[in-house]
Amino acid sequence: QVQLQESGPGLVKPSQTLSLTCTVSGASIRSSESYWSWVRQLPGEALEWVASIYYSGSTYYTPSLESRLSISLDMARNQFSLRLTSVTAADTAVYFCARDRGGSYYDSWGQGTLVTVSS
Amino acid sequence: EIVMTQSPATLSVSPGERATLSCRASQSINSLLAWYQQKPGQAPRLLIYDASTRATGIPARFSGSGSGTEFTLTISSLQSEDFAVYYCQQYNNWPRLTFGGGTKVEI
């Protein structure tokens, strides 16, 4: 059974960098069948795709955040990470990591982590 | 961007009744649609993919239909554990996946 677990600071100051890591168990991030993604949910809002990465290192970013985003893999630790620079209060959200099956739907999700941007 | 519109925003149903949720895409997405269930404080759970295929372990009371721009999620007989928010998501325009605004199913 695939399990994903987010980790990272729950509070980030405005203008600083948000950094999150997703640890995957029960599956390898080297798999050619999966993309590894971040999805966020703003308070009281719907879900928003943020970024995805493939085992080859190919990256994909949502256009509205692309200039501030970076997603990466750590094969040795079976983890992938997200960095979002120059955060503002508008980036306050629950951030989920998820497995995307072959460029389609998300079949496994982490429990989510609330990141609050505040001084 | 493909915009996904769900209706109604809130659906009030009694246990044992049938619930019908709608999702409309701003352009054709063929059958590349998924449905998720989300309960408070939890991650979304995949229910349906490819518009009508139930995910592993999903009860038969959940069914999906539609293609093109109009889709439906039906819960044939609501159980207490089914009261939640339901989201549709298109993946025709991968990687720019987009979600609907959600339908809250309440008692």
Image (spheres, coloured by chain):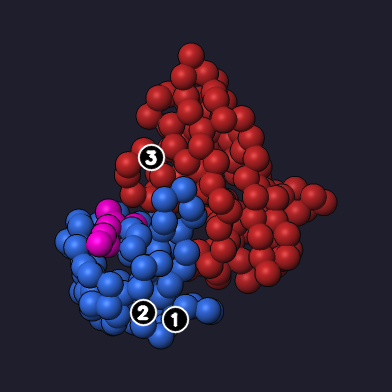
Chain colours: A red, B blue
Q: Kindly state the secondary structure of the residue where label 3 is placed.
A: loop
Residue B59, numbered circle: 1
**At 36% from the left edge and 82% from the top edge, which residue is drawn?**
B61
Magenta-colored stretch includes residue B106: yes
Q: Mark 2 points at which residue?
A: B62
The chain containing the residue under callout 3 comes to A
Q: Kindly state the secondary structure of the residue where label 1 is placed.
A: loop
Magenta range is B99-107
**At 40% from the left edge and 25% from the top edge, which residue is drawn?**
A89
Packing grade of label 1 (10 A; few <14, some 14-19, many >=20) is few
Q: Name the residue under label 3.
A: A42
**At 55% from the left edge and 41% from the top edge, which residue is drawn?**
A113
Alpha-carbon distance for marks 1 and 3? 30 Å
Q: What residue type is labelled 2?
A: Phe
Near-viewer residue (A109 or A57): A109
Quadrant for the N terminus of chain B in the image? bottom left
Near-viewer residue (A59 or B35): B35
Viewer-side label of 1, 3: 1
Packing grade of label 2 (10 A; few <14, some 14-19, many >=20) is some
Q: Kindly state the secondary structure of the residue where label 2 is placed.
A: strand
Viewer-side label of 2, 3: 2
Query: Residue A16 location in percent, x, y?
Result: 54, 20
Quadrant of residue B39 within the rendered picture: bottom left
